[in-house]
Image (cartoon, rainbow, N blue to C red):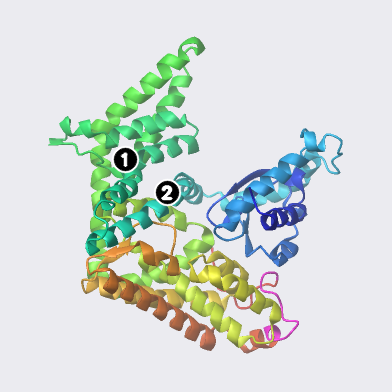
Amino acid sequence: MPSDKHRDTAAAILPLVGGPDNVTSIAHCMTRLRIGLRDRSLVDDAALRALPGVLGVVEDDTYQIVLGPGAVARVTPAFEALVAAARPDSPASATATATVTADDLAARGAALRADRKARNATPVKLALRRVANIFVPLIPALIGCGIIAGLNGLLANAGLLPTVVPALAAIASGFMSLIAVFVGHNTAKEFGGTPVLGGAVAAIIVFPGVAKIDAFGQHLTPGQGGVLGALAAALLAVCVEKWCRTWVPGALDNLVTPTVTVLTAGLATLFGLMFLAGEIAAAIGAFAGWLLHTGGAFAGLVLGGLFLPLVMLGLHQALIPIHTTLIEQSGYTVLLPILAMAGAGQVGAALAVYCRLPRNRSLRTVIKSALPAGFLGVGEPLIYGVSLPLGRPFVTACAGGAAGGAFVGLFNQLGSVFGSTAIGPSGWALFPLLDGRSGMGTTAAIYAGGLAVGYLVGFAATWFFGFTDRMLADLNTDGGKDPATAPPANAPAMA
């Protein structure tokens, strides 16, 4: 049950997004409440940003209110309950009269929705968002199992609690051993198929009996192809299922369609997709290792420097299949600690903005409220509330991320290879998930050093290059412009 604080936050948000009749859908990810709207013009952005529990707002396919980890999972059910209670057909609102009809709202918002969709619904972005929709629901389990795996490793290395270690290993590994099934289920659901059929076809990949099957002149290996194979198998199952629906008589649909779907997609998975996906997964792992072994600091600089723009565009979730593939292969993803340096650059930039604008109380309040989440790797509040609206500090934050990434990449090239056993957290929250070849102490020290470099370079770059004289004159006053509402000064050009 949500606490009074979270119910109050939900109750404060609802009228500011146009009321319950303006809400068409409700969902949440790790940090954001995602709301579908009928009429975007009814939303009061400035008032939403001013709410104590709101860290920022983002407009994408849905209207996204950044509440932070933990809080969003408690505010969302309270918000859903308020919207449900206010519906005209709800018992709680049977006597209420809606002031604005759904048809009125739809007519007013049609032009806005059409224009925004035309700008954002590119094939690449839509495909990446669909991939994200498949994997994002799996992140909580990945985090929990990853932390347990790290704890189990510490106990095993220290020789402590030998009777508990096997139990922790089973708990940590159970989900990862069956992750292909969950990916198949979510893929079929996302693409309009029957979820359980997608899971059934993907389950073939992890079935131990596939070791008895020859494909392309070699025995298959249970788990071969991993999440990539599961994704492809479930997609094929959706295509077969939809094809069956076009010709199978309704009376036979329950018997014929599932059978043909599982049989056809299953055979294709065993005698094609598992092998091909396995080769692709092996290539991804080999390329990641080669990139850091040969590119080192330069590779880290590029990865760390470009990650904030990906987060800004919401495209960073598309990297989840790559991270998951690396975790399946080696037990950790070497890319995540480098990409996490982008958050360090963002924190350093925000601290410099705080120090450079001592008279801007509004902006300093935003930074103080968003910094704790920033240190824990949740960068959206600082991105959308501080650096991106200001423009230049966003670029200098990227410079900090590039420097931190170069630091971590250099040590990877020197042989101190390490990564994260799960995806989701970054910043300080990533420490419990670190694992590598050089031991926990060395690994943690390198990662901490990367964070420190990111903080320092992000701070210094923003201090010296983050403001023009005009920006300082406009912003460093008690009446300074709120970056959440003011247009950016000298903002970088972005697609």
Q: Is residue 38 visible?
A: no
What residue is at 52 percent from the left and 60 percent from the top?
Answer: 313
Q: Is residue 483 visible?
A: yes
What residue is at 42 percent from the left and 49 percent from the top?
Answer: 141
Is residue 208 shown above or below 349? above
Could you say which is closer to the camera, residue 119 or residue 344?
344
Tell me which amino acid carries mark 2: Ala
**Which of pointers 1 and 2 lies earlier in the amino acid sequence?**
2
Where residue 310 sits in the image (x, y, percent)? 47, 62
Locate residue 24: give its quadrant.
top right
Image-based side of 402 in relation to 285, left or right:
right
Q: For numbered disc 1, what is the local secondary structure?
A: helix
Where residue 17 sits in the image (x, y, percent)? 73, 53
Is 477 a magenta residue?
yes
Q: For numbered disc 2, what is the local secondary structure?
A: helix
Query: Total marks drawn?
Result: 2
Q: Which span is picked out in magenta?
A: 474-485
Image-based side of 96 in relation to 386, left or right:
right
Location of the C terminus by quadrant is bottom right
Residue annotated with mark 1: 229
Categorize mark 1 by other alpha carbons within 10 Å: few (<14), some (14-19), many (20+): many
Residue annotated with mark 2: 141
Could you say which is closer to the camera, residue 494 or residue 46?
46
> Mark 1 or mark 2, which is nearer to you?
2
Categorize mark 2 by other alpha carbons within 10 Å: few (<14), some (14-19), many (20+): some
Tell me which amino acid carries mark 1: Gly
Is residue 359 shown above or below 203? below
What residue is at 60 percent from the left and 50 percent from the top?
Answer: 61
